[in-house]
Amino acid sequence: MHDGATDTAKQIDGEALRVAMAHSLRYAIGKDPVTATLSDWRLALTRAVRDLVVDPWFAATRRAYAEKRKRVYYLSMEFLIGRLLEDAIHNLGLEAAAREAVAAHGVDYAALVDDEPDAALGNGGLGRLAACFLDSMSTVGVAAHGYGIRYEHGLFRQRFDQGWQGEEPEDWLRQRHAWEFERSEVAYPIGFGGEVSPGEGDGALWTPSDTVLAAAYDTPIPGWRGRWTNTLRLWDAQPVREFDLEPFNRGDYMAAAAPSVFAETISRVLYPDDTTPQGKELRLKQEYFFTAASLADILRRHRAMGLEPRSLAAHAAIQLNDTHPAIAGPELVRLLVDDHGLDFDEAFDVASATLNYTNHTLMPEALERWSTDLMGHALPRHMQIIERIDTRHARETKRPDSVRIVDNGEVRMGDLAFISAHRVNGVSALHTDLMKQTVFAELHALHPEKIVNQTNGVTPRRWLYGCNAGMRRLLTETLGSEEWAADLDRIAALAPLAEDAAFRERFQAIKTDNKRACAAWLEREHGVSVDPTAMFDIQIKRIHEYKRQLMNALETAALYNAIKADPSAEFAPRVKIFGGKAAPGYAMAKLIIKLINDIAATINADPAMKGRLAVAYPANYNVSMAEILIPAADLSEQISTAGKEASGTGNMKFAMNGALTVGTLDGANVEIRDAVGEENIFIFGQTAAEVLATRANGYAPQSFIDADPRLAQVVEQIEAGFFSGGDGERFRAVTENLRGHDWFQVCADFTSYYDRQRVVDDAWAKPEEWTRKAVLNAAGMGVFSSDRTIRGYAAEVWGVTPAC
Ligand SMILES: *Cc1c(COP(=O)(O)O)cnc(C)c1O
């Protein structure tokens, strides 16, 4: 598709980059090569590469203005971007030059790249989606800004203390963030609290009691070959005044510093989701802070182009990534009414033509609600506007009592986002259907045109080209150029090669190499030694009951029992790998982590398991760890309770790298099955409809435990302290839940899961057949490129035409 397109990235050879690096080291970093540390060299290369991004970045900006392109604004509380240096080097086609330049300075390239902190400004899939979308918007040429918060501390660093999760603050900004440009001239005052008095017409005068400044930091995001470059703008909260001079002069230094303490708290930490009321008010303030700053910036840019606020929707599309920025509806109305003199109805029409909302979860406890007291106190003017939006919607739909945004003393942010949006999208076909049937059933009946589906995707630049050098070379050679990285549909050409024994052998050799590298890393960094010829069976994602790491742990223990009971039985040798963090306040998830580690310790200490079964749980799962594990996976665990995982994106990354999936018909697994063929994926368990029926018919997990002696044995072992040095109390909450409510129906699906895993064993015993399936999995993944997703949003949600 892109062959022949102009690549705006400046071509530069290794020698030129070496000189540029030396120059940056000296004049940007201020270091002499003689004393430079690895980090200094990394910063020097980063600056040299960043310099090469600037021209394509300006070119894209100029083109967006010249062609009067409609702009897309992606508002997200989270951007799980990980490391940026290698990604930029790959996108700009600079790898050979960078390797040469770094080597010429006597520095190890892999170590240098590895030195970059992993920017963990997100929790999991939602934040990583935002990061993949940034890369894809730049690659397909959608003129876009990502807007978020420049958290001083991203997601906590996880460690294990005797198998229990411990949390340490993450400190990605300890070294300077060499990618960003500080824009001290771009800063907006953001108010909180205070009083509202009536103004003219529909307007009001809001006098906040507290004000902070939102200051912009820009990171350029170059797309493939620099054909387009966008901006990630992150807001830092700063005091309007650094300190109060009067208390300072009195010697009261604490009081003098109070203004900066309040302000800086707002962008201090990323909240792990799933946590309870603590910090609720601060979280609401964070959401308003970045949303208000972004909207102020969007309106400023719109007016700078000489355009009227009334025409905003023709020139801008704003995407709300989940409900976190849902205050955008009321805030945009406020700006248009109070600052620009529109009447309320006109303003709401502009807002609801500009905003779009992506829903990420159907779980009622995860849909945000704020008490009207808190909202009225923190954002009094917005509370008035929310009530007015609610009244207008009830009047227009002639449903005064059903679907109210303000209900039972709470503001329902999902409903607010839906009603304020032009389009509302789910993130997989199944999830979108369920959205229509459940959380938004009534709103969907009133607005049948609003809900559309845009199945998630992942960027093949990071998740294939970047993380799997072996596959990259094979694909490039097989497909004739590197353009597959920007046009993943080309990977379909692998399908016929699945029948070619020589090709299969090369494909498998790459997997084996990746597994060896992964095994060496596990040994070096985490002290576990595993057999790289065994099947690598991997489940990596946030620890949550609905994702059912517990079911995997129980199956692992049951397999252990089965091998012990019959040492001659033919089970595939396996390395089970777990990775993931639990939200610090989520006790059950933390207990499941400890159980996995206890089971791992028992199995790994048993000499009878040598070469048969091992369990590894490397601490502190993040993007960089995913980049090591995913290319090494044979089996991808996607085993959530059907109906609970909106899409999943880990599932796509694995299949792209030639892993087979064992999974339920949940989220995008359904579409992965359709893309790879049902004979090439291991589906098990209840469907979403069956899960609901089981619950409705009075689910009794104990009857499933009684029916499967393998499950019964493991539950009894846990209760007897078999995996925990005789401590029968430790996992009581886990086993009581299994025998009691078992909300996520682990017991109902266990038998089907265990039996399916034995079918996986049989498939593993036929390596040629396994590899054939693996090739067909990779070949079917074109549709899961986030470039496809972004083109879908462009056409069906934003109304923009991509430039590339
Ligand atoms: C892709 C990714 C996720 C999302 O994984 P799921 O399996 O879809 O939940 C979470 N965290 C990281 C670091 C990722 O790269």
Image (cartoon, rainbow, N blue to C red):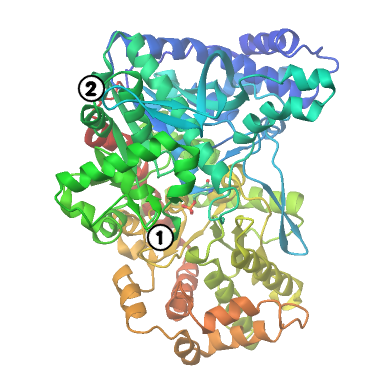
Q: In the image, is residue 469 above or below residue 573?
A: above
| Element marked by disc 2 | helix
Give the Cα distance between marks 1 and 2. Answer: 34 Å
| Element marked by disc 1 | loop
Q: In the image, is residue 748 above or below residue 276?
A: below
Percent from the top left, x then y, of residue 411? 39, 49
- What is the three-letter code of the residue carrying label 2? Ala
Asked if the residues shown at circle 1 and circle 2 are in contact, with their CB atoms under 8 angstroms apart, the answer is no
Q: Residue at x 71, y 77 (%)?
A: 730
Q: Residues within 10 Å of mark 1 (few under 14, many from 20)?
A: few
| Quadrant of the rendered image containing residue 459 | top left
Percent from the top left, x then y, of residue 618? 68, 55
Query: Is residue 90 in sight in this rendering?
Result: no
Q: Nearest the camera: 109 or 219?
A: 219
Q: Is residue 405 left or right of residue 149?
A: left
Mark 1 or mark 2: name the one nearer the start of the chain. Answer: 2
Residue at image mark 1: 363
Q: Residues within 10 Å of mark 2 (few under 14, many from 20)?
A: some
Residue at image mark 2: 314
Q: Is residue 259 left or right of residue 68?
A: right
Q: How many marks?
A: 2
Which quadrant, please, contains the N terminus?
A: top left
Q: Residue at x 33, y 65 (%)?
A: 679
Q: Nearest the camera: 94 or 224?
A: 224
| Quadrant of the rendered image containing residue 555 | bottom right
Which quadrant, please, contains the C terminus?
A: top left
- What is the three-letter code of the residue carrying label 1? Met
Percent from the top left, x then y, of residue 120? 60, 40
Query: Is residue 361 in sight in this rendering?
Result: yes
Q: Nearest the camera: 193 or 36?
A: 193
**Label number found at residue 580:** none
Percent from the top left, x then y, of residue 713? 59, 88
